[in-house]
Image (tube, rainbow, N blue to C red):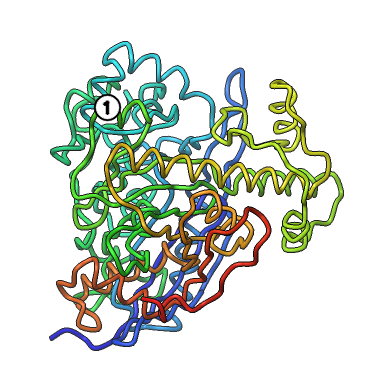
């Protein structure tokens, strides 16, 4: 019999930090309990004639087990554990052993991989098969540029690698696998021609599994490490939408089908949910992507640069000795009345870490445009540019898919940025509903809860899961106004549902 309530542990890993959160699920909704938070970020290591960016995934795993130990100590009856992370990056294994620290997607080595893949398969055929937006760090290009691939017998994306270390089971969760470029967008299976285009040896890619599948119980040594029970009463690792955006889209509190979403964080993922991929020439020309969603849905979207631009700017100013109060800085940006330059946040000069204000000024100067001069103007320029990119992307998606969009849901950390949300409403001309902030962890928790049959959720539809989110959170509504001059409408969204 399904339990009327219960708790699960969500491991949510981002490119700048990781968290372990316990989600308590009952018929009234979901309550999130933060158990652990720890830093994450690429590490620069010298190799041969250059500096390379890697993830210290071993330390990441250690922090995850420490967080799970705290979670189990507080709640010994945890029913499941689920892991999500950023996409595209992977670890290589040989006989179960990790072959070096994984490269970070912002490392520049992947550029030569693009040329190698395109020499074997042109861009049009790539898109017809995998439906992915061209990004030079797509896993397919990374694999083609990685000489260590030839010495490996398994490649596991980051959440799959951590799942393997927890359970000893090798698998590829399908939503994250869809971001690699090796998955066929129509069949939803590994595509032999795509694998060959990257020069991947046969057998390198593991068996595909779906969100909600049980990966396996914790290894006895891991269960002992985190203080968990073993045997048939142990909490299994359950696969969720392990690409963090796939989990975030589960937790969009949509009450109508004609919605768009912006999963706003380091990156902004701007898109709609479809039942089937769109692989047309128009979709390819627009550089839109078809990624897998939970329950076989398609996340049709574009990757747009996100609050990385702002966070890197703040880091630059702090390295220069400034003490930055981000909330006050955003308030100052909202008070800027003079026009600021809207730049292209997708320009490749903004991809690597470093001095973002100098790069923005250089971008403006190269085009004869006025550059921001104060910190408030830089912030206003960044947020105006992001909002303009969101609006342009949504117009393109509407044209390519024919989908009617009546409301935009902003979820993730960016939903707390009131100025960005208002500018997005102004530039799209659509109401923006902001929240939940914890969308990724919420989606992770709900997929686990459904798999475990908690709170009567066994077999629940995606729409039923979203209705739980809508009952749990109260999004803030931002109505379109004259740009930059109105305060957000804080009407409780649920009263207008």
Asked whether residue 255 is in view, the answer is yes
Query: 218 and 491: which one is in front?
Result: 491
Q: Residue at x 28, y 37 (%)?
A: 154
Q: Residue at x 63, y 53 (%)?
A: 483
Asked whether residue 170 is in view, the answer is no
| Residue 10 percent across, percent down from the top left | 39, 67
Up-down: is 264 above or below 111?
A: below
Q: Residue at x 32, y 28 (%)?
A: 284
Up-down: is 482 above or below 150?
A: below
Image quarter of the N terminus: bottom left
The image quarter in which residue 168 lies: bottom left
Query: 380 and 200: which one is in front?
Result: 380
Number of numbered labels in the structure image:
1
Q: Is residue 10 left or right of residue 293?
A: right
Up-down: is 14 above or below 455?
A: above
| Residue 318 percent across, percent down from the top left | 80, 49
| Residue 26 percent across, percent down from the top left | 31, 86
Q: Is residue 59 left or right of residue 232?
A: right
Q: Is residue 59 left or right of residue 324?
A: left
Q: Is residue 130 left or right of residue 269?
A: left
Q: Residues within 10 Å of mark 1 (few under 14, many from 20)?
A: many
Q: Circle 1 sits on which residue?
A: 127
Q: Residue at x 35, y 53 (%)?
A: 405
| Residue 45 percent across, percent down from the top left | 61, 33
Q: Secondary structure at mark 1?
A: helix
């Amino acid at each position: 019999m399904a339990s009327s309530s219960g708790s699960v542990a969500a491991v949510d890993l981002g490119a700048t930090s990781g968290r372990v959160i316990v989600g308590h699920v009952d018929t009234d909704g979901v309550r999130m309990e933060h158990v652990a938070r720890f830093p994450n970020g690429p590490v620069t290591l010298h190799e041969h004639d250059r500096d390379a960016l890697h993830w210290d995934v071993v330390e990441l795993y250690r922090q995850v087990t420490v967080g799970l130990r705290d979670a189990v100590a507080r709640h010994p009856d945890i029913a499941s554990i689920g892991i999500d992370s950023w996409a595209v990056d992977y670890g290589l294994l040989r006989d179960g052993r990790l072959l070096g620290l994984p490269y970070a997607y912002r490392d520049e080595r992947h550029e030569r991989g693009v040329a190698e893949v395109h020499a074997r398969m042109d861009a049009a055929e790539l898109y017809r098969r995998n439906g992915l937006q061209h990004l030079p760090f797509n896993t397919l290009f990374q694999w083609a540029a990685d000489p260590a691939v030839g010495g490996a017998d398994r490649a596991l994306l980051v959440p799959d690698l951590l799942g393997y270390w927890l359970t000893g089971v090798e698998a590829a969760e399908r939503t994250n696998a869809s971001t690699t470029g090796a998955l066929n967008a129509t069949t939803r299976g590994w595509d032999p021609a795509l694998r060959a285009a990257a020069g991947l040896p046969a057998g390198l890619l593991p068996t595909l599994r779906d969100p909600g599948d049980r990966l396996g119980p914790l290894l006895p040594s891991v269960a002992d490490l985190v203080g968990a029970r073993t045997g048939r009463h142990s909490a299994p690792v359950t696969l969720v939408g392990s690409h963090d955006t796939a989990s975030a889209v589960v937790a969009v509190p949509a009450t109508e089908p004609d919605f768009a979403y912006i999963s706003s964080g380091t990156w902004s993922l701007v898109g709609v949910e479809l039942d089937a991929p769109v692989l047309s020439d128009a979709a390819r020309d627009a550089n839109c992507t078809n990624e897998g969603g939970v329950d076989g849905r398609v996340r049709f979207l574009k990757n747009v640069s996100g609050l990385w631009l702002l966070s890197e700017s703040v880091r630059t100013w702090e390295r220069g000795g400034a003490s930055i109060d981000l909330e006050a800085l955003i308030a100052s940006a909202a008070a800027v009345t003079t026009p600021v330059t809207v730049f292209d946040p997708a320009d490749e000069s903004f991809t690597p870490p470093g001095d973002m204000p100098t790069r923005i000024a250089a971008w403006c100067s190269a085009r004869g445009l006025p550059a921001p001069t104060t910190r408030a103007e830089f912030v206003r320029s960044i947020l105006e540019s992001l909002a303009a990119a969101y609006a342009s992307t949504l117009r393109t998606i509407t044209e390519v898919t024919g989908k009617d969009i009546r409301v935009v849901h902003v979820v993730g950390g960016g939903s707390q940025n009131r100025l960005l949300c208002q500018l997005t409403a102004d530039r799209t001309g659509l109401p923006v509903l902001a929240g939940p902030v914890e969308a990724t962890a919420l989606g992770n928790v709900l997929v686990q809860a459904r798999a475990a049959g908690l709170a009567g959720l066994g077999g629940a539809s995606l729409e039923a899961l979203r209705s739980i989110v809508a009952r749990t959170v109260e999004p803030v509504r931002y109505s379109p106004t004259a740009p930059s001059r109105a305060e957000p409408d804080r009407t409780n969204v649920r009263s207008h549902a």
